[in-house]
Amino acid sequence: MKKLLIILSILLFSICIAEEYTTQEEIKKIADETQECIDKNYQTDYAMMQCTIKGTNKYKEEIERTIKATKNFLSEDQYKQYLKTQKQWESFMNEYDKLLKQTYEKKCPPHLACL
C-alpha cells in the first residue's frame, strides 16, 4: 500500500504539469478499483497482493502517460531533466524496496513471529 501512496503522490505532482492528460478522476478510479478488489479478496495475503499489483501497474501506466504528455509542456532541456529526475526517483524506490526486503523478509524459525 505504501508503494501505491508514493506513486499516487508522483501522479498528483505530475497532474499539475499535465492536467489534461491525467485527471484526478482517473487516479481516484484506480484507487477505488484497487480498494474494491482488496475488499473482495481479503481472505488471503496472496489475493490482496494480486489486487495491489494490478493497481500498481495501472498507476505505472498513468505515470508513463503523464511523462509522455509532459513533453508538450516543457522545453527539450527541461524534459531531459524531468526524465533524469524520474529515473533517479525509480532508482531510489528500487533501493528502498531492497531495504524493505532485507528488513522484513527474513527466514525465521517457525516458533518465532517475524515481520
Image (cartoon, grey):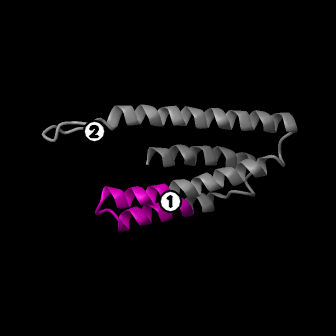
Q: Nearer the viewer, residue 28 or 101?
A: 101
Q: What secondary structure is the stretch in magenta mostly built from?
A: helix
Point 50% across, 59% down: residue: 54
Q: Using residue 82 as the reference point, say whether residue 32 is left or right of it.
A: left
Point 39% across, 62% down: residue: 38
Point 69% across, 57% down: residue: 22
Image quadrant where residue 62 sits: bottom right
Point 53% across, 43% down: residue: 6
**Which residue bears the numbered disc 1?**
54
**Which residue bears the numbered disc 2?**
115
Whole-angstrom CA distance, mark 2 to mark 1, is: 24 Å
Q: Using residue 109 as the reference point, say whether residue 90 is left or right of it.
A: right
Look at the image and say whether residue 40 sits in the magenta stretch: yes
Q: Nearer the viewer, residue 12 or 64?
A: 64
Tell me the SS state at disc 2. loop
Q: Position of residue 46 (x, y in %)?
A: 35, 57
